[in-house]
Amino acid sequence: MKKVKAVILGIFTLIPILYIIFFISVFFHMFLNTVNSTNTESSINLFKIILPLHLSTMILVIVLLVIYIVNVFKNDTIESDKKSIMGDSSVLW
């Protein structure tokens, strides 16, 4: 894999990790607003934003998983008998 593609793949790999932090903070914000019964309209607006982001992040994770599995099987540095183990462990992780 060329360096530019590897950097782009690395950036896309970081997106789900950053999204988890964002999602947890938004979830706590919505939870605290609901518990305090203050500004529930704000929570609804946040939910309208977070739902498409959540779905797109899940799709991104599936696409990244496919890219990683294809990369394992195309990689010549990995021995052929270990490729299936690497692919399976990527799915199970």
Image: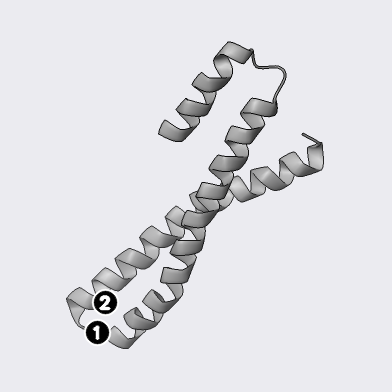
Colour pattern: one colour
- In percent of width and height, residue 14 lies at 58, 47
* Left or right for 7, reference 52: right
Q: Quadrant of the N terminus?
A: top right
* Left or right for 30, reference 84: left
Task: Look at 37% across and 75% down and name the residue there.
Answer: 47
Q: Answer with the quarter of the image where residue 77 lies.
A: top right
* Left or right for 85, reference 73: left
- In percent of width and height, residue 30 lies at 30, 72
Task: Look at 62% across and 50% down and name the residue there.
Answer: 12
Residue holding disc 1: 38
Q: Are marks 2 and 1 in contact (CB under 8 Å)?
A: yes
Local SS, label 1: loop
Q: Amino acid at mark 1?
A: Thr
Return the disc, 2 or 1, that comes first in the chain's sequence: 2
The label on residue 33 is: 2
The crowd level at tag 1 (other Cα within 10 Å; few <14, some 14-19, many 20+) is few
The crowd level at tag 2 (other Cα within 10 Å; few <14, some 14-19, many 20+) is some
Residue 21 in sight in this render: yes
Task: Look at 73% across and 39% down and name the residue there.
Answer: 6
Of residues 65 and 5, the one nearer the viewer is 65
Task: Look at 76% across and 43% down and name the residue there.
Answer: 5
Q: Residue 55, relative to residue 82: is it above or below?
A: below
Q: Residue 29, relative to residue 5: is it above or below?
A: below
Q: How many numbered marks, from 0 up?
A: 2
Q: Amino acid at mark 2?
A: Asn
The label on residue 84 is: none
